[in-house]
Amino acid sequence: MRTSIIPWCGAYPAPHIVVMGNHKGGSGKSTFAMHIIIALLKAGKRVAFFDLDVDQQTLTRYVENRREWASQNKLELEMPDRYPVTEEHSVSSEWSNSVDLTQFMSHLKKIESGHEYDFIVIDTPGGAQHLSLVAHGMADTLITPINDSLVDLDVMVAIGPKDLEPQPSRYANTVARAVEARRTVCGRTTDWIVVRNRLELLPSRNQRQIEHVLEAIRTRLGFRTVRGLSERNVYREFFAAGLTAFDTIEGPVSGAKPSPSSLLARLEVRELIQDVGLVEKHAGIEAVFGGAIREIELAMAEAKAADAGDRDEAPLKPSAATSRAPEGGLKRDT
């Protein structure tokens, strides 16, 4: 039986809670949160969201940009419902200047009593803020994006001398305790997913190192890893209009019209959303891709085949050196 969305667990059915969490900023939490929201909406789900990063408010501005773009261009775009939270400025509070926990809980109880949503997406700020930690303990699905570099990996692992075993970071241990406490109190498990973002397009020694380190602590902490988003300018270009890789819109915004980069981004995000497991493989978002993705996949397959053909023929092509070889040397058959 599913239990209440409030941390101390009740008896009411509850929406599925997706939390974006990472103590390090700049890992792509808000971009990924927006793509999850739109994927769910396009799949016919009812979605609400909280932006607990009251300083940056990146996810909030992303949705506002989307609303403004739709209004200016007289378009019907999918929109989630936002539940705003404000800062608590009580000087007597241990968590002064953090998000107002009472206000947050009030919103959750209202959502719970209304039974209006299938999913709640919560974007959390960097740092160990109180409400962020509470949200981690509420997550049915916890997604931790990390930039695919050893420097950013320390949010998960304390990197030490090569001869020592990788040790979980403070954040990783905190999340593991929250997940275990939730299972003990509520009987509910958390699907903790580490998403490797800003991946290099070609395999590298750095990628293999990160994969090795994550594998070393994955079982101990209970998370799984999925391949995230590559470093593409199109993701930054989408933000100004509030668009995502799932939107196919003709317009003057760079990244809005189909292009190799935007089509590859759409394919990449589709696979990521499916790997996370919130949307079924053949859900409604599949129709959004239409023939465009099939065309780009075909083009990629053709390019790969052509490249393989070129490599097969390469030994038969005379180089500048062989073309000058004396009689009896290497020459092409006719």
Image (cartoon, grey):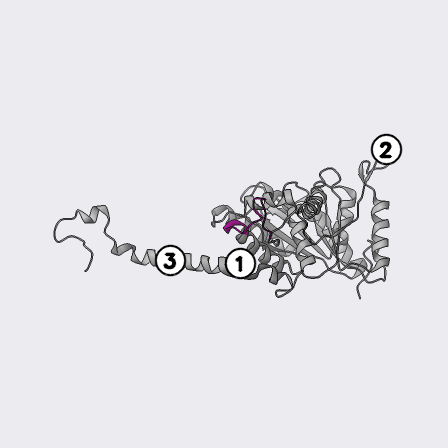
Mark pair 1, 3: CA separation: 21 Å
What amino acid type should be assigned to the residue bearing mark 3?
Answer: Ala
Give whichever of 231, 77 is nearer the camera.
77
> Residue 165: which disc?
none
Q: Secondary structure at mark 1?
A: helix
Quick check: 278 above or below 243?
A: below
Q: Name the residue tied to disc 2.
A: 91
Residue at point 46%, 60% (across, down): 298
Q: Is residue 259 magenta?
A: yes
Q: Nearer the viewer, mark 2 or mark 1?
A: 1
Q: Quick one: label 1 or label 3, which is nearer the N terminus? A: 1
Give whichever of 225, 221 is nearer the camera.
225
What amino acid type should be assigned to the residue bearing mark 2?
Answer: Val
Within-10-Å neighbours for mark 1: few <14, some 14–19, many 20+: some
Q: Position of residue 277 (x, y in %)?
A: 65, 61
Q: Quick one: label 3 or label 2, which is nearer the N terminus? A: 2
> Residue 292: which disc?
1
Q: Secondary structure at mark 2?
A: loop
